[in-house]
Image: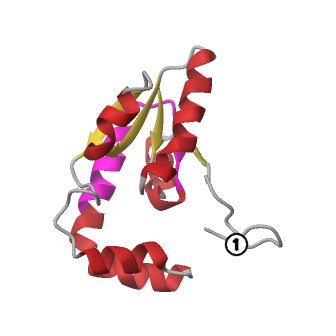
Amino acid sequence: MITILCAGSCGDFQPYIALAQELGKLGKEVRIAGGKSFEAFIKGYGIGFYPLSVDYQTADIDPKMLQEAQSSDNPLKMLLTFNKMKKYVLELTEEMYYACVDSELIIYHPGATIGYFAGEMLGISSVLAAPFPMHKTKEVASG
C-alpha cells in the first residue's frame, strides 16, 4: 500500500490524484489520506481514501486564522499562525501518522511533513512530492 498524505484545497489534491492513478496503472495499491470533505472527490477517480476527521474545510476554525496560514509568505510566519491552530494540527498529525501505519511507502504534500517522520518511525521510505515550486524562479513565484 502506498499512502499519499495531502492537505489543503482541491488544487492541492489534484496532482496527487493524477499520481495515484499512474501508480495504480503500475499495479500499486494507493490511497490518499485527506480531509473528509474530499472523500467523494477522490473516490470518484477510483482511488482509495483514508478520511481524516480534522478537515480545514469543515472544522470550526476561524476563517481569518486559516487565511493567514494559507497566505503566509515564509515558514516562520506560517509556523506562528499554525501555532494558534495547535489543537487542530495535533489531531491532524496523529491521524496522518495512523494513516501510514500499514504502508510500504509514504508520499507527502509539503503541508503534511508528518509523512517524513512517520516513515522514520515506521522504518519505511517517504517522499516529499510538492505540487508547486518550493522556491521562487523567474517564471513562477514559490507556493
- Judged from this view, the residue extending furthest toward the top is 27
Based on the picture, tell me whether residue 59 belongs to the magenta stretch: no
The residue lying furthest to the right in this view is 138
Q: Nearer the viewer, residue 55 or 99?
A: 55
Residue 21 position (above or below residue 57): above
- Residue 109 placement, left or right of 41: right
Q: Position of residue 52 (x, y in %)?
A: 27, 46
Residue 89 shown left or right of residue 102 in the figure: left
In the image, is residue 95 above or below residue 76? above
Looking at the image, can residue 36 be seen? yes
* Mark 1 residue crowding within 10 angstroms, few (<14) / some (14–19) / many (20+): few
Image quadrant assignment for residue 54: bottom left
In depth, the one of 11 and 114 nearer the eye is 11
The residue type indicated by label 1 comes to Ala
Question: In the image, residue 93 lies at what x, y percent?
Answer: 33, 57
Q: Residue placed at 21% from the left, 56% from the top? A: 58
Task: Tell me, yes or no, if residue 125 can be seen here.
Answer: no
Q: At 47% across and 77% down in the image, what residue appears? A: 71
Residue 131 is situated, as x and y percent measured from the top left of the image, at 61, 52
Residue range corresponding to the magenta coloring: 91-109
Q: Is residue 109 left or right of residue 49?
A: right
